[in-house]
Image: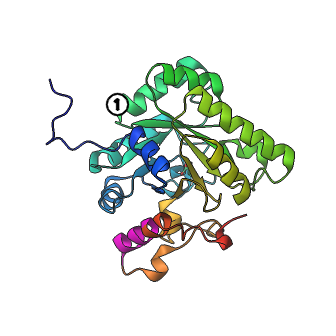
Amino acid sequence: MSYSAESVKTPLTVLDLLAMKQAGEKIACLTAYDASFSFLIDQAGIEVILVGDSLGMVIQGKTTTIPVSMDEMVYHTRCVVQARQRALVIADLPFLSYTTMESALKHSAKLMQSAGAQMVKLEGARIEIIKGLVDFGVPVCAHLGLLPQSINQLGRYKVQGRNLKEAESIIADALRIEQAGASLVVLECVPAELAATISQQLKIPVIGIGAGVSCDGQVLVLYDMLGISRGKRPRFSKDFMQTADDIPAAIQQFKQEVKQALFPAEEHGY
Ligand code: KIV
């Protein structure tokens, strides 16, 4: 058996993302939930595809991510993995699927073994869970700032880390997450200045959504950036179809604007 067969096309890995951060190259990430969009995103050269539990809203028409089940995450992740060649695929661990080490391992196994994801994402500074997953070879992306799975406690989707105490707590969490062995952090809806500090302090890449242009990369919900989500588009997103002739061109435009640090502009930030 050879580990270096030149002819076998392998997807990007956590090491490639780390090298991009070190080289100062921005990382582009979009969500996808099916094979057709996965193919288009992959063809555009986007480095990371996130099978987010945002599928609860944009695919299932629910108002939150809470009802999304493990079986649904596995199904959509499998569809996405099937069609990509190069992009690294991250899959969300859904609400309450990682409350114990045992359940986090069992559900990560489903996303990675059965569905083919290369990394799992979980919300909050779940330090012991992150350590345990990493210990067993599961690459982890942690999600800080606005935590959509906590919506029933938050009351509404709002910017996090606006005051000093909250900002310090998010910075401390990010550092602990890195220490615990996470490979990536998604930072959602925080002031741009706070996100810049965190991106600077961490060695691992920080992918922002509503977190300003200084993050190491950007992620958007695909349906928001194609202008086809129901309801009002979030301030931090941008409808790339407004200036594109077709979907591949819109995805390409997103990638170019991320690479050149043109997106997000100040109007998209807090
Ligand atoms: O579920 C999702 O799509 C996400 C992004 C908003 C980062 O977590």
Which residue is located at x 43 percent, y 69 percent? 256
Q: Quadrant of residue 97?
A: top right
Quarter of the image that includes the C terminus: bottom right
Residue type marked 1: Ser
The reply to whether the magenta stretch includes residue 185 is no
Residue 190 lies, in percent from the top left, at 71, 54
- In this rendering, would 186 be left or right of 162? left
Q: Is residue 88 visible?
A: yes
Q: Quadrant of residue 17?
A: top left
Q: Is residue 132 above or below residue 61?
A: above
- In the current view of this chain or complex, which residue is farthest to the front? 23
- In this rendering, would 27 be left or right of 215? left
Q: Is residue 48 above or below residue 259?
A: above
Which residue is located at x 67 percent, y 35 percent? 175
**Foreground of the two, 188 or 65:** 188
Residue 251 lies, in percent from the top left, at 40, 67
Which residue is located at x 48 percent, y 70 percent? 257
Q: Is residue 125 visible?
A: no
Q: SS for tag 1?
A: helix
Q: Residues within 10 Å of mark 1 (few under 14, many from 20)?
A: some
Q: Would you name the residue on which mark 1 appears?
A: 114
Residue 152 lies, in percent from the top left, at 74, 44
Query: What range is drawn magenta here?
Result: 246-255
Which residue is located at x 75 percent, y 56 percent? 159
Residue 222 lies, in percent from the top left, at 47, 61
Could you tell me what secondary structure mostly forms the magenta stretch?
helix
